[in-house]
Amino acid sequence: MTAAYYSEHLETMSAGEVDDLQSRLLQRHLPALVARSPFYARKLAEAGCDARSIRRPRDLRNLPFTDKAELRESQLAAPPLGEYAGVPMRDVVRVHASSGTTGRPSYVGVTAADADAWADIAARVYWCEGMRPDDVVLHAFGLGFFVGGLPLAEAVQRIGATFIPLGTGATDRLLSSAADLGGTILSCTPSYARYLAEHMRDELGRDPRTLGVRRVLVGAEPGGAIPAVRDRIADDFGAEVRESVGNADVFPMYAATCDALDGNHLLAPERLIAEIVDPESGDVLEWEDGAEGELVATHLDRECVSLVRFRTRDRVVVRTTPCPCGRTAPRITCVGRTDDLLIVNGVNVWPSAISDVVSSVPRTTGAIEIVVPGPLPKVDPPVCVRVEHAAEPGDLETLCATLEGRIRDKLVVRAKVELLPPGTLPRSQAKTRLVRVLEPAEAGQ
Ligand SMILES: [Zn+2]
């Protein structure tokens, strides 16, 4: 297999070759970063570490983590990009922002070289997901600050495919351009794909398969890794579904599902060192099949806002068995955000697991919202799960009992299901959160 955006050299290296490559790059990048970033100079000094003592990826465990709160504080203290920017603003060619929850967004700057690297990795990701030069890509991600929008146009164009910049909130335009321009790929969040299928079926009386896309490429939220969600989208559109993993602070996309559909290959070994750590203790876990922990990322050639041991808060499961596609990189599947975990009577419950169970029950739309009364992770049973029923749900009491029984059997947790009419819960074109923590005033009602 040879193609412009498949690198046989990088994608079939042995673990030892990757370690050697990353060691060489790390020895060059880290001392240079410390020299230009007061943030990391101070952080390493406080931890009593010398950047030059970090020779190989496994030495990174001697360095402290970087978390999102530190980045936010640094940007407030040293605007606009923080003391970790590492380059002056005149070298920054574009600024994006990560989806902040409240207040000031967290800005991410890129230099010309960074923008080039983003496009290069994203093109590799798209190629792995099956995008080819004759594809016409209906891009229904936000085209503003969001890293899953504009930066990906360049990647699509590098492959030689056609980028249709639809953005969000443009369902009518999406439907007309799919027909007018012959869209072959739909690129969007899994929740939007589901919304679009429902909208076509219920509001327009149209089979979603008439959209005519051959692939749906999803990302930005964990749904694409949930088998029942993926199968439903595939069935709705009569299309293959592939997922990518990315993050505003790390890279817009850096891992993708191949045709084997068994996790997302890490596709940027020359630009990113990934570690898996125990989210509670911070202990480093080995890259072994079945390992589960938080993904931690270190850039190897980033110029602006280069990060060292950044805690992504993405909880992933690792696959390392040989993959039929020939790529040797480990695969990750994101099972949730570490800050979304529910602990119910001592049992860990991931919102994505509840979503998976609900999606497997017919007569629901698959959309859910878990409502918790207080701060995560501890939740007293029963867990309140709001579920949308389908347009023709049959007997609601039976459906409710089926859902509660299925959640109890599969996840060993007691749930109280509240059924809602289809289309009630918000669908997002950027990121959908499955958990809503009630404000104190609401909780008291
Ligand atoms: Zn593969």
Image (cartoon, helix red, strand yellow):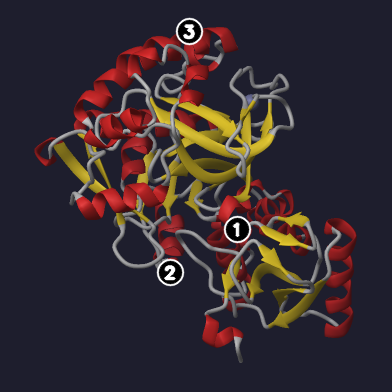
Q: Quadrant of residue 103?
A: bottom left
> Which numbered disc, 3 or 1, marks the residue that appears first in the sequence?
3
Residue 171 in percent (x, y) is at 45, 67
| Left or right of 353 in this view: 214 | left
Q: Is residue 404 above or below residue 60?
A: below
Helix, strand or loop for disc 1: helix
Q: Amino acid at mark 1?
A: Asp
The foreground one among 269 and 122 is: 269
**Name of the residue lying farthest toward the bottom:** 445
Residue 79 in percent (x, y) is at 18, 51
Q: State yes or no: Cβ of the residue under disc 2 lies below 8 Å from any atom of ligand 1.
A: no
Q: Which residue is mark 2?
A: 172
Residue at 23 percent across and 39 percent down: it is 85
Q: Which residue is mark 1?
A: 340
Q: State yes or no: Cβ of the residue under disc 1 lies below 8 Å from any atom of ligand 1.
A: no
> Which numbered disc, 2 or 1, marks the residue that appears first in the sequence?
2
Q: CA distance from mark 3 to mark 1?
A: 36 Å
Residue 289 in percent (x, y) is at 73, 27
Helix, strand or loop for disc 3: helix
Q: Quarter of the picture for ligand 1?
A: top right
> Which numbered disc, 2 or 3, marks the residue that appears first in the sequence?
3
Residue at 41 percent across and 51 percent down: it is 139
Q: Which residue is mark 3?
A: 20
